[in-house]
Amino acid sequence: MRPCEMLRDSCRADWDAATDHAFCRALAAGTLPRDRMAWYLGQDYLFIEEFVRLLAAAVAHAPSLADGLPAARFLGLIAGPENDYFQRSFEALELTPAERAPAPSAPAAGFMALMARARRSGRYEQMIAVLLVAEWSYLSWGERHAGYDPALPFWFAEWIDLHSGPGFAGVVAYLQEQMDGAWPGLDAQAAAEAAAMFREAVALERAFFDAAWAGGDSAARAAAMTETE
Ligand SMILES: Cc1ncc(CO)c(N)n1
Ligand SMILES: Cc1ncsc1CCO
């Protein structure tokens, strides 16, 4: 089995929950309430900066130019069309200033910390582990919903487009190859650290969709109130 498949299978329950989530099913069906999409986009945009820094670090640490170029091209997609998607969606969904710059939820804060840790490790395989989870898990749900109703509003339709199709599948295949290529050269400790990062990232993907589906801050507030009652 490929190392990347072995990693995925080591956290299969979280993987399956993250890649076939009720949040994504509602998004693709067009039934996701506006407030939940606004919460999700506001939270997701909080860590695009850490993501860009991490991806740039992977480019810097790639073993060769050929290994780094696909990541460099993908960086252009995030900095361009994906960033534009966020700005247009913020406008169309009329996000308030508070919704645009929310306090990070626990999973969003967890992602920011994990991405910073992977970047600062200086270890290419740790960087690739976090990037691979982010993109592979999103391709897995995106492909599931690529046949959406063309009447879907653009803030749902383009989020699926960004995470499906041959171009994005190529990004994921590249990240899988980078992980598989690095794996045989790792000692036991380095392999264990990269695997732990992979699993932590998958658990965070699941927790992030759970929080977005539960209603984000309103659910968190309700839970906090119940706790203090
Ligand atoms: C939480 C999260 N994971 C993955 C992606 C796709 O890169 C995203 N936009 N947000
Ligand atoms: C926007 C964003 N949020 C978390 S990761 C990321 C970039 C990859 O889609």
Image: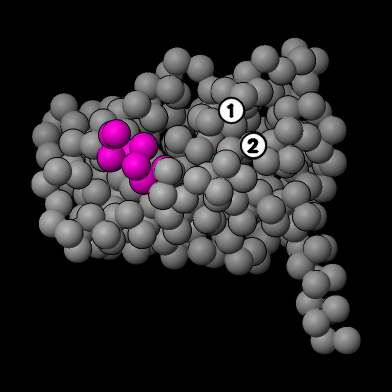
SS of the residue under disc 2: loop
Query: Residue 227: percent from the left, percent from the top?
Result: 80, 82
**Where, by quadrant of the figure, is residue 90 drawn?**
top right
Q: Is residue 122 left or right of residue 94?
A: left
Q: For mark 1, what is the residue? A: 142
| SS label for mark 1 | helix
| Mark 1 and mark 2: Cα distance apart in space | 10 Å
Q: Which residue is mark 2?
A: 20
**Residue 142 position by quadrant:** top right
Amino acid on which the number 2 mark rests in the picture: Asp
Mark 1, Cα crowd under 10 Å, few <14 / some 14-19 / many 20+, is many
**Residue 124 image point, x, y percent:** 22, 49
Q: Residue at x 45, y 24 (%)?
A: 168
Residue 85 appears in view: no
Q: Nearer the viewer, residue 61 or 102?
A: 61
Q: Residue at x 28, y 34 (%)?
A: 2
The N terminus: image quadrant: top left
34 left or right, relative to 137: right
From the viewer's perspective, is the residue at label 1 or at label 2 nearer?
2
| Percent x, y of residue 41 | 66, 45
Q: Is residue 97 left or right of residue 2?
A: right
Q: Looking at this view, is 29 or 7 the one in front?
A: 7
Q: Identify which amino acid the numbered label 1 is placed on.
A: Gly
**Residue at 67 percent of width and 41 percent of height:** 21
Q: Is mark 2 within 8 Å of ligand 1?
A: no
**Chief SS of the magenta region:** helix
In the image shown, does 112 or 189 lie closer to the viewer? 189
First in residue order: circle 1 vs circle 2: 2
Magenta segment: 1-8
* Residue 139 visible in the current orientation: yes
